[in-house]
Image (cartoon, rainbow, N blue to C red):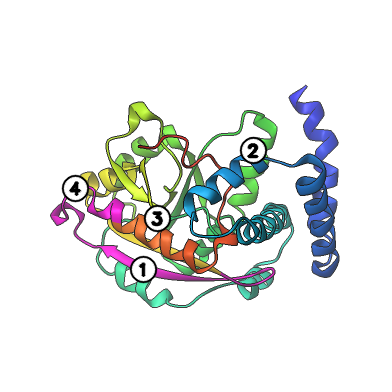
């Protein structure tokens, strides 16, 4: 059954990926109408999240953010499909970096780096960074149940020579690379909600006290990894700009959980700047005090 679903869906995905960008975004507008007005995908969750994060805004103001966020959500996931056939040249035009020299400085430190990101703007196209650094780019991701779609997603996300590794395999890979002296950049999006039995730290996120992922910080301390945050800004439809923000080049000297807290403050800055580009459909605040 998994294979049947895949062979039916794949031709449609490929056709979407080869659409010229003007037509591509007209199609995205159509998908938005279906997702938002017909299906109503996770509207209850989005409204709950926006009410918690922006209690000072009126219902009308939150509704504007809600609609814009669904529009962007459709764009972003279709852009992931577009990656199947997009050229390197086109990607370089649409996803730019303001300060790649900072990564070059971190490369000179002679140790691997953890790149912290959030589910904001375009985390999918972040994987195109790999051709701009001498680090081996490795993205940590959660495996998809359908093995055929999982392979397709891995192929799409590794198009620009990034390697994808499942969450459970990330630690053994880090240990192996460390032992072999393979300098790597590990990308982790750590702004979602951890399971309560794995919550070692709570912090206020968008004004609400919640459990937070601390795995990236723990790994940075264990293997003495540099820590960078990447801020992605949506310039206009289909165009993004990434800026690297240094967090620490000596994580063992940083008090416990401070790296995690700094990361969350950076994510909050992004959200307050333009909340419509955050991933509001995720149940980020399902556990709270």
**Residue 256 marker:** 4
Disc 4 is placed on an element classified as: loop
Left or right of 198 on screen, residue 7? right
Total numbered badges shown on the rendered structure: 4
* Front tag of 4 and 2: 4
Q: CA distance from mark 4 to mark 3?
A: 17 Å
Residue under the image location 38 percent in, 52 percent down: 207
Q: Is residue 36 visible?
A: yes
Disc 2 marks which residue?
151
Q: Residue furthest left?
A: 253
Disc 3 is placed on an element classified as: strand
Q: Is residue 83 above or below residue 219?
A: below
Q: Earlier in the sequence, mark 3 or mark 2?
A: 3
Left or right of 289 on screen, residue 51? right
* Front tag of 3 and 2: 3
Q: Earlier in the sequence, mark 1 or mark 4?
A: 1
Q: Earlier in the sequence, mark 4 or mark 2?
A: 2
Q: Quadrant of the N terminus?
A: top right
Q: CA distance from mark 1 to mark 4?
A: 20 Å
Q: CA distance from mark 3 to mark 1?
A: 10 Å
Q: What's drawn in magenta, residue-wise?
A: 234-261
Position of residue 60 measured from the top left corner of the image (x, y, whole percent): 65, 59
């Amino acid at each position: 059954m998994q294979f049947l679903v895949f062979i039916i869906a794949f031709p449609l995905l490929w056709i979407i990926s080869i659409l010229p960008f003007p037509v591509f975004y007209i199609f995205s507008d159509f998908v938005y109408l279906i997702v938002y007005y017909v299906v109503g995908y996770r509207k209850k969750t989005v409204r709950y999240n926006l009410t918690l994060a922006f209690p000072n805004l009126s219902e009308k103001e939150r509704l504007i953010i809600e609609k814009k966020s669904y529009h962007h959500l459709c764009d972003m996931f279709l852009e992931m499909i577009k990656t199947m056939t997009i050229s390197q040249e086109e990607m370089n035009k649409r996803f730019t970096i303001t300060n790649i020299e900072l990564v070059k400085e971190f490369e000179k430190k002679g140790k691997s780096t953890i790149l912290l990101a959030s589910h904001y703007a375009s985390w999918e196209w972040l994987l195109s960074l790999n051709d701009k650094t001498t680090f081996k780019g490795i993205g940590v991701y959660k495996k998809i149940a359908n093995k055929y779609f999982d392979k397709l997603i891995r192929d799409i996300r590794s198009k620009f020579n990034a390697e994808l590794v499942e969450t459970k395999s990330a630690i053994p890979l880090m240990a192996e690379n460390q032992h072999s002296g393979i300098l790597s950049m590990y990308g982790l999006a750590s702004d979602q909600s951890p399971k309560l039995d794995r919550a070692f730290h709570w912090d206020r996120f968008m004004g609400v006290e919640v459990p937070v992922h601390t795995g990236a910080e723990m790994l940075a301390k264990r293997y003495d990894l540099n820590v960078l945050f990447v801020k992605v800004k949506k310039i206009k439809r289909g165009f993004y700009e990434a800026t690297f923000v240094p967090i620490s080049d000596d994580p063992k000297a940083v008090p416990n959980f401070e790296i995690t807290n700094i990361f969350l403050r950076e994510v909050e800055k992004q959200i307050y700047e333009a909340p419509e580009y955050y991933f509001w459909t995720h149940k980020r605040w399902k556990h709270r005090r």
